Amino acid sequence: MGRLFLIELEGRIYSCRLCQSHLGIADDIISKAFHSRNSRAYLFDRVVNVTVGEQEDRMMMTGLHTVVDIFCVGCGLPVGWKYEFAYEEDQKYKEGKFILERNQLAGPNVNAFPFVEAFGLVGIPEPVDDA
Amino acid sequence: MGGVEDGQPPSKRLRLSCAGSSSVSSGVRTEEPVAASSLRDSMARPRQCQGEEEVIGSRGMIKKLEFVRLIAGALYALGYERSGACLEEESGIPLHSGAIKLLMQHVLDGSWDESASMLQNICLDETIMKSAKFLILEQKFFELLDNGQTMDALTTLRTEISPLNIKTSRVHELSSCILHHPHSQNGYARKDSLKPKLRSEVLDELQKLLPPTIMVPARRLEYLVEQALNLQRGTCLFHNSSDLDMSLYADHHCGRDNIPSRTLQVAVNGEVVLKHRLCGHQKSVCQVAWSPDDQQLLTCGTEETVRRWDVLSGECLQVYEKAGFFAVSCAWSPDGESVFAGFSDKSLCMWDLNGKELESWKGQKTVKISDLAVTLDGKQIISICRETAILLLDKETKVEKLIEEDQAITSFSLSNDGKFLLVNLINEEIHLWAIDGDIKLLTKYKGHKRSRFLVRSCFGGLEQSFIASGSEDSQVYIWRRSSGQLVDILPGHSGVVNCVSWNPVDPHMLATASDDRTIRIWGLNGANMRHKVVQNNGTHQSNGKL
Ligand SMILES: [Zn+2]
C-alpha cells in the first residue's frame, strides 16, 4: 500500500482512538460545549489528517447547517464533521471549523519522544484528563 | 525621413530610395508592363492603386516588394550570387539601392573616404548619419594605426572623427591608442574594442545603424522562418518531439500520440527477477535513492537508520545514524561522494561514504515526512522544514531561503537542470517554483485526486516540458508544464497511483506504481513510433522513492 500522508502535530495532541493519527491540538479548541448524538464534542479551529465526505444540510440544535462528515486518514474512523455553511447569522462563526467527537479521541497527550526531548523542552503541562 | 534624393545613380535601377519601399516600388512599376499585372489571377490580384503597394498572401499582409528583397537577401546569404542577381534583374526589385551597394563595396574594399562620402548620398537622419560616419572613420583610424601610419590616424581623429561631436569618451579612448601605440611592441596590448574589426563586421554594424528599409537586415528571411517554427512549437499542445522532426513543408503539430499514453508493459509482483534481498532494516523502508553512478542504493527505514548498499552484491556497505534519533529521509550528493539524511530531531546531517560526519545543521530543518534533495552544483540542500515550507539551505554560505505555501506540502521533486521545484500540496494542487535566483511561483497544476496518501508527481518529456502525477482515482494525470493545461488522463491502474517517473533518457516512456500492486510502463500509441521505446535500454540515473 502507498504511504499515508500524516501531519505530525506538536503540543497537547488529540489523536484517533483507533490508529493514533494526530487530529488536533488543545490550543486550537474554540469550545468544549458541543454535543454529538453519542458524545460530548469539541469545536476546533483546525483539524488535520482527515478526509471529508459528501456535503449535506443537517438540522442541528442551533439551526440548519451545511456540513461534511470527517474521517481519520489513518483508519477511516468517523471522527466528527466540518461546518461549511451556517444559515443562521449568529452561527456563522462555525463556518470552516471542525467538530471532533470526544469518544473517538485519545489524549490529549504531549508529543512523545523524540521531537520534544530533542529540544529539551521543560515545564510542559501534564496531560489533563478532561473526559 | 526625408524625400528622395538622387545622387549620381550609375544606372536607372540604382535609384536611391530613402522613403524606402514606396519610392522603390514606384520605380518598379514604371518598368513593369501594365498588361502583366492585369493578367494575374484573383488570389494574387495586385491591389495596386496610386500610392498603394502590391501585397501578396491570403490576408494581404505581405508587401511583395519586401518579400522579394528578403528572398534576394536569402539567396546571397546562401552563396547563390548569380541567382540573387538574377532575381533582382527579373523582378526589377533591387535588394539594395545603388548607393547602398556602392557603400557596401567601398567598406569591403576599405575605401573609407569614399564610404563616408557615400553616406552623404543616402538620405539619413542626422543622428544616424553621424553614428554611421563614426563607425566607418573609426575603422579607418584603426586600420591606419595598424599600418603604422600613426600621423594619418591622428589626422583622421582630429579632422574627421572629433568634429562629429559624438561619443566623446570613445574619442578619448581612440586618442589614448595613439599615445600608447609606439609601445605596443613591448607588451602593451590593446583591448579588442580598440582594434580594427573585420570589414564584414563593420558592414554588420552599419546594417544595425541604418533603417531596415534602406539596408535589409542580413538573414532576415531565415529569422522569420525560425520565428514561425518557434511559434508553432510553443503552441503545440502535445509537443514532445525533437526540433529535427520539424519540417517547413507542413505546420508542426504533435498529436496526442507523442506523449506516453499506452500501456506497454505491466509488471506484477514476481514478474521482475529478484536479484538480492537487502536485509538489515527492521521496519518498512520509506525512501530509496540510486547513487549517481547507478551502482549503489541508499535506503531509509521508517523510524530507523539510513543504509548504503552495493547493487551488484546486495551487501550493506554502511549504516548512517544519529544516536537517539531516527532517520526520516536520505539523499546522495550529485557527485556521489557524500550522503545526506534528515532526522527526527529535525536536523540534517552530511557524511562521507565511510560514515564520518562532515557537517550537521540543527534546528527546524525537516519534518517527519519529507523529501530530501541536493542541487546539481552540490551547494543547496532542499528539505521540507515545516508543514507549509520548503527550506533551500546553502551549504557554504549558510544562507537559508524558503518556499512558503498556504497548504501542507506532501512531497517535491527537482527538475533535472536543478532550477525548478515541483511541489505537491495536500489540497490537490501541484505548484511549480523557480528556485534559481529569486524564488517565484510559476504555474499550478490541478485535476488529480488526493486525500490520504503521499502521491508523487514528476517532470518529464522532451526538455521536461510535461508534468505527470499519480492520483487516488487510479489514473495518471499529465499537464503541459508551461501553461498548466491538463492534456491527458491515463486510465489503467485499479488502485491509487502513488508514484510516477518519466524516463530521463527516453521522452516517450513513463513508469507508474500503484496500490494495485503493479508497475505500468507507458509508451507511445502509434505503432510506427514504437521502435523508439523498444530501442532504449541504456542505464540512467534515477531517484526512485517509494
Ligand atoms: Zn484512525
Image (cartoon, coloured by chain):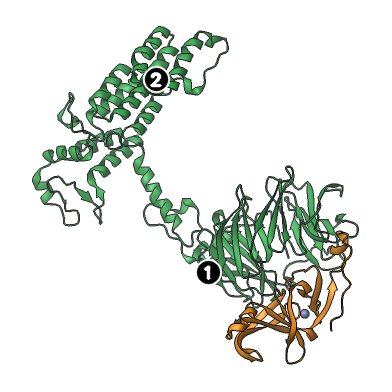
Q: Residues within 10 Å of mark 2 (few under 14, many from 20)?
A: many
Residue nearest the observer in this picture, B388 or B208: B388
Q: How many marks?
A: 2
The answer to whether residue B281 is above or below residue B178 is below
The verdict on label 2 being within 8 Å of ligand 1 is: no
Q: Is residue B419 left or right of residue B317?
A: left
Q: Quadrant of the N terminus of chain B?
A: top left
Q: Is residue B113 left or right of residue B323?
A: left
Examine the rendering and report whether any part of residue B280 can be seen: no
Q: Quadrant of residue A26?
A: bottom right
Residue at 57% in and 69% down: B477
Badge 2 element = helix
The answer to whether residue B352 is above or below residue B118 is below
Residue B488 screen position, x and y as percent: 53, 69
Q: To which chain does the residue with label 1 belong? A: B
The answer to whether residue B106 is above or below residue B333 is above
Q: Which mark is residue B139?
A: 2
Residue nearest the observer in this picture, B311 or B197: B197
Residue B419 screen position, x and y as percent: 61, 50
Residue nearest the observer in this picture, B434 or B111: B434
Residue at 80% in and 65% down: B285
Question: Which chain wears green?
Answer: B
Q: Is residue B23 left or right of residue B188?
A: left
Please tell me if label 2 and label 1 are on a single chain.
yes
Badge 1 element = strand
Question: Which chain wears orange?
Answer: A
Q: Which residue is mark 1?
A: B488
Residue B8 screen position, x and y as percent: 17, 23
